[in-house]
Amino acid sequence: MWPDAIADALGRFDLAFRQPGRYLNASEVWQPGREVEYARDDLEEAMRHLPRGARHDLGRLVARIDDEFERRTLPDPGLPRASTVGGWWWSRSRER
């Protein structure tokens, strides 16, 4: 992890969630590798290394992010949730 990795990941979600409309726009990629799925990976990695109290606090934020991300995306029928290599968030589609 790098300095400000958590702030950077949270900022990427903040930008994504400011998009108008019910669903996240699949074409909103600011730089390759900067999609919110990568940001979620970064948050997961950070939670593995934080002390208990900080992990709990970040976990509450991440739970709210997960709820909003799941609400604003659709299941990808080609990627069953249980069989994804990464986290469940990689099995979601922003395409309608």
Image (spheres, helix red, strand yellow):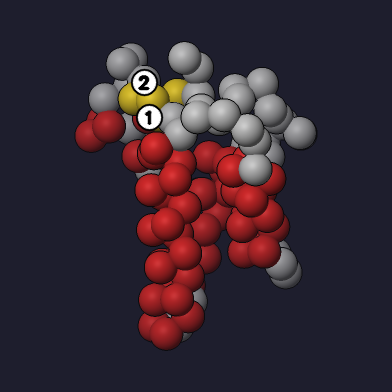
Q: Which mark is residue 45?
A: none
Q: Position of residue 38 (x, y in %)?
A: 57, 43
Q: Which residue is mark 1?
A: 91
Q: Examine the rendered structure and indicate whether residue 5 appears above or below residue 22.
A: below
- Circle 2: element type: loop
The residue drawn where x is 42% and y is 85% is 53
Residue at image x 38%, y 25%? 74
Q: Secondary structure at mark 1?
A: helix
Question: In the rendered structure, which amino acid carries the disc numbered 1?
Answer: Ser
Give the residue pinned by disc 2.
Answer: 76
- Left or right of residue 63, residue 81 in this image: left
Q: Position of residue 18 (x, y in %)?
A: 65, 43
Q: In the displayed structure, does residue 88 sit left or right of residue 2?
A: left
Q: Nearer the viewer, residue 1 or 20?
A: 20
Residue 83's x, y, as percent?
26, 31
Residue at 41%, 67% in the rendered image: 59
Please identify the quarter of the rendering in which residue 88 is found. top left
Q: Is residue 84 above or below residue 63?
A: above
Q: Earlier in the sequence, mark 1 or mark 2?
A: 2
Give the answer, above or below, for where 66 lies relative to 10.
above
Q: Residue furthest front?
A: 21
